């Protein structure tokens, strides 16, 4: 019996030594960690870009969805009322601007015609006035001479040196020329009055040009308001489109955060969606175990939820900074006291097999070390 007991102890020692050797050998050839998790690049929380009352929730947790499929909608009636009002305001401004443009064109045409007529008339009246002045001046010289001749003829008549008929002819010529001069003076006054009236009409046309400039400013102001309202309309249309929530990719609804008919704020989470086919493994590897781990190394993975299955993978990347580098609460070493801590680095692993794995599962990971030392 004693020999059997000794034999059993020896066998146990050998078994433990063998297992210990295998354990140490396995750990020396593989970087092992139980801080692994299943993650996905296609895991997102979906929300509306506008706030409001939820009108429809079309999907439940666990439902499969396709890219572009409608998931939920917000009551958009208030936005539609605003859109219609803004659209009507734009139409009203457009009609007003069009009417003012037509009015401006009509006034410009009238001004052009009035100015051309006024300028031509002014030129004509100036020439007429100039001719009348010259004619009156010449006739006044003639009339002065006739007055002298009439006086001289009267003296000759008194002396009976000429006939009475000849004297009357001279007097008739004088009176006729006098009447002609008076008529020319009236024409001159009339022409001057007409010239003044035409000049006033020209001034009115020029003043209308100033009114046209003000009209142009009003039209530009209306166009500016119209452009601003078009921007508002575009924004309102965007908000209406934001009232529908679509799936950004194929996946499964992982969580629903709200219930139907609830009023939510902009950005409040509605659904979480995940694509189970777009998953990878991520492991936090101690810096002491990084020796020999390189991109492209083969990986064996076991999930706690699937203990009887081993998954294979490949190291895809090793982040260049430790997980604590971007910690919100950095370590305080200002006092000079320092406790060395084992830092962990994130290693991303591309999975060759994914069947059965779900996002968030815990993993045990063994990375086969490269024969060459160093870290990549």
Image (cartoon, rainbow, N blue to C red):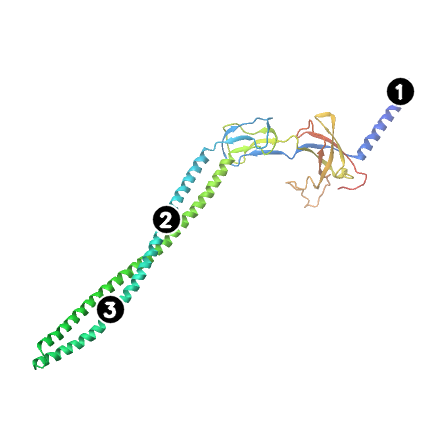
Identify the image quadrant of residue 211: bottom left
Where residue 289 appears, x then y in whole percent? 76, 37
Quadrant (top left/top right/bottom left/bottom right) for the C terminus:
top right
Residue drawn where x is 12% and y is 78% of the image: 151
| Image mark for residue 310 | none
Please say if the residues under marks 3 and 1 sit with CB atoms less than 8 Å apart. Answer: no
Residue drawn where x is 26% and y is 67% of the image: 129
Left or right relative to 196: residue 376: right
Local packing at callout 2 (Cα closer than 10 Å; few below 14, some 14-19, many 20+) is: few
**Circle 3 is placed at which residue position?**
132
**Circle 1 is placed at which residue position?**
5
Where residue 257 appears, x then y in whole percent? 56, 29
Secondary structure under the numbered disc 3 in the rendered image: helix
Task: State the separation of the CA atoms marked 1 and 2.
Answer: 118 Å
Please state which of residues 266 and 279 is positioned toward the viewer in this rendering.
279
| Image mark for residue 102 | 2
Left or right relative to 171: residue 138: right
Left or right relative to 250: residue 351: right
Task: State the separation of the CA atoms marked 3 and 1.
Answer: 158 Å
Please state which of residues 117 and 5 is positioned toward the viewer in this rendering.
117
Please state which of residues 83 and 310 is positioned toward the viewer in this rendering.
83
N-terminal label among 2 and 3: 2
Where residue 306 appears, x then y in whole percent? 71, 25
Quadrant (top left/top right/bottom left/bottom right) for the N terminus:
top right
Identify the image quadrant of residue 277: top right
Q: Residue furthest top?
A: 1
Where residue 141 appears, x then y in whole percent? 20, 75
């Amino acid at each position: 019996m004693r020999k059997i007991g000794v034999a059993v102890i020896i066998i146990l020692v050998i078994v433990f030594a063998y297992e210990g050797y295998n354990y140490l050998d396995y750990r020396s050839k593989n970087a092992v960690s139980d801080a692994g998790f299943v993650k996905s690049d296609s895991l997102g929380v979906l929300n509306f870009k506008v706030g409001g009352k939820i009108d429809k929730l079309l999907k439940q947790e666990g439902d499969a969805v396709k890219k572009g499929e409608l998931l939920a909608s917000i009551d958009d009636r208030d936005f539609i009322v605003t859109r219609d009002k803004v659209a009507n305001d734009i139409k009203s401004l457009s009609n007003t601007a069009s009417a003012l443009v037509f009015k401006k064109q009509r006034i410009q045409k009238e001004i052009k015609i009035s100015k051309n007529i006024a300028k031509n008339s002014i030129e004509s009246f100036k020439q007429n006035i100039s001719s009348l002045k010259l004619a009156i001046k010449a006739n006044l010289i003639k009339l002065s001479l006739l007055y002298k001749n009439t006086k001289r003829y009267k003296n000759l008549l008194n002396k009976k040196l000429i006939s009475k008929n000849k004297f009357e002819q001279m007097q008739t010529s004088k009176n006729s020329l006098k009447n002609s001069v008076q008529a020319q003076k009236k024409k001159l006054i009339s022409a001057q009055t007409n010239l003044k009236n035409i000049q006033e009409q020209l001034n009115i046309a020029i003043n209308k040009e100033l009114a046209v400039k003000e009209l142009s400013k009003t039209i530009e102001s209306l166009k500016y308001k119209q452009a601003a309202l078009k921007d508002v309309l575009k924004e309102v249309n965007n908000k209406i489109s934001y009232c529908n929530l679509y799936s950004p990719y194929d996946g499964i609804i992982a969580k629903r955060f709200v219930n139907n008919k609830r009023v939510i704020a902009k950005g409040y989470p509605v659904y979480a969606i995940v694509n189970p086919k777009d998953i990878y493994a991520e492991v936090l590897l101690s810096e002491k175990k990084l020796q020999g781990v390189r991109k492209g190394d083969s990986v064996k993975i076991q999930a706690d939820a699937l203990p009887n299955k081993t998954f294979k993978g490949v190291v895809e990347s090793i982040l260049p900074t430790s997980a604590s580098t971007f910690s919100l609460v950095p370590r305080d070493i200002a006092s000079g006291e320092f406790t060395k801590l084992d830092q962990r680095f994130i290693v991303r692993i591309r999975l060759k097999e994914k069947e059965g794995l779900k996002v968030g599962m815990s993993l045990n990971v063994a990375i086969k070390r490269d024969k060459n030392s160093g870290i990549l």
